[in-house]
Image (cartoon, rainbow, N blue to C red):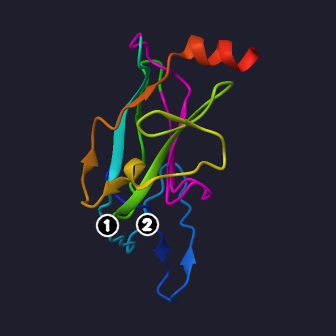
Amino acid sequence: MPGYLDTYYSNGSGTWTALVLNDSELRAGVNLELSRGAYASGHVYDQDTGAPVAGALVSIRYSASELGATNAVSAADGSYQTSAVPTGTYYAFAKVPGLGTFVWPGVPCQEPCVLTPAEALLLDQTIEYPDTDFRLPHIDLIMRSSFD
């Protein structure tokens, strides 16, 4: 559910356990306390033409070297929406197959990326951060320069 952090079920013994239900099974006595988190949504598109970029892996990370705290893939119209993360300072990346990795809002980087505070994404409230758009340098130019 957008806006809520992943929640694990504690079976009362202080350990976390998977809760498996069959298709039509109802189970009483299972109470989950959901916590709100911050999440990003937006589009990935070509900054020169405005064309959407489908299939970009958008990840929200604590740093350049961390795995994604949450990931999403841009749809045919370039739109994406991440899952919720705890509030904090993150970096957003868009990885486009065959083209490379870009730091929000569209700075090309060779991994491991060298990040600056200006590229940080402050998600300090438990709300949606809409319009977190990636404006990627013109795709044709990137492809052409990568083969020269």
Question: Callout 2: few (<14), some (14-19), or many (20+) C-alpha neighbours within 10 Å?
Answer: few
Q: Earlier in the sequence, mark 1 or mark 2?
A: 2
Answer above or below: position of 69 versus 108. below
Q: Which residue: 41% across, 36% down?
A: 105
Spatial CA span between label 1 and label 2: 8 Å
Image quarter of residue 80: top left
User: Magenta segment: does it hold 107?
Assistant: no
The x and y percentages for residue 143 are: 65, 16
Q: Which residue: 28% across, 45% down?
A: 129
The residue that label 2 is drawn on is: 7
Q: Which mark is residue 59?
A: none
Please, which residue is most extreme toward the bottom here? Answer: 13
- The number of callouts visible is 2
The residue stretch that appears in magenta: 49-74
The x and y percentages for residue 27 are: 43, 66
The amino acid type of the residue labelled 2 equals Thr
Question: Pointers 1 and 2 in contact (CB under 8 A)?
Answer: yes
Q: Secondary structure at mark 2?
A: loop
Q: Which residue: 66% across, 45% down?
A: 111
The amino acid type of the residue labelled 1 equals Ser
Q: Which mark is residue 35?
A: 1
Judged left or right of residue 63, residue 131 is: left
Judged left or right of residue 56, residue 85 is: left
Q: Which SS does the magenta portion mostly show? A: loop
Instruction: Identify which residue, 125 or 100, lies in the foreground.
Output: 100
